[in-house]
Amino acid sequence: MSLRCETGPRGRHEIVISESLSTKEAHKALFRFDDDAYTIAPESLLDSLHRSIRAGALKIHVSGGWEWMLRLALWKDETPSRGEVFFLLKGLGLSDDDLRPFASSDCNDIFHCLYYGQRFDVLRRLCNKARESSEKMAAPDGGVRINCHLVAEDAGLIVASSL
């Protein structure tokens, strides 16, 4: 008698949900998973996570850009408000003085400031917060590991990770 283990999408226990082709390629360049491990999220990231867990995935990598990591950390499908982003980033170690220049600009500009300012500590904390939120909300029983990888799409590189 043999036991059969449920598996995730395409019969895999470890998968990658990517935001786009470029975030997939950034992950693949570093981790070198087979093509069948990758899915570009066709719909909401949160729905993709839930569906992958229901399908039996035990380890999920999320490879995405700044806004995707913010959405995961805040556990919401829509673009977060400036207030939500500022509150989150303050909890990750940024001060009012750090955020003041962005009071009237696009929240995506904050990423460029952190990235080019080499504030990788904050970017790593964001990935860790995204991992914690997604594991708590998508897999509250604790049986699934979710790793979050922040990609600078213009550079085509993972610049921070929860690993």
Image: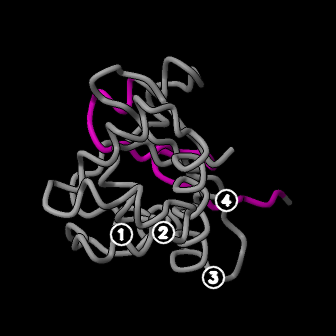
Q: Position of residue 19 (x, y in %)?
A: 30, 44
Residue 39, image quadrant = top left
Mark 3 and mark 1: span between their CA atoms?
26 Å
Residue placed most toward the observer, 105 or 136? 105
- Indicate which label's residue lies in the foreground, 1 or 4: 1
Label placed on residue 140: 3
C-alpha distance separating marks 4 and 2: 26 Å
Contact flag, marks 1 and 2 (Cβ < 8 Å): yes
Q: As drawn, is 149 to the left or to the right of 20?
A: right
Compared to residue 6, the image places residue 21 above or below, namely above
Instruction: Identify the mark nearer the N-term, 4 or 2.
Output: 2
- Work out whether residue 38 can be spotted: yes
Q: Give the numbered dot on residue 86.
A: 1
Magenta-colored stretch includes residue 14: yes
Q: Nearer the viewer, mark 3 or mark 2?
A: 2
Proximity of marks 4 and 2: CB atoms separated by less than 8 Å: no
- Reading the chain from its start, which is encountered first: label 3 or label 1? 1
Quick one: label 1, few (<14), some, or many (20+) residues within 10 Å?
A: many
Q: Quadrant of residue 96?
A: bottom left
- In magenta, the rendered stretch is 2-25
Label 2 secondary element: helix
Residue for point 30% across, 42% down: 40
The answer to whether residue 157 is left or right of residue 81 is right
User: Tag 1: residue type?
Assistant: Phe
> How far is disc 1 from disc 4 in space, using C-alphas?
27 Å
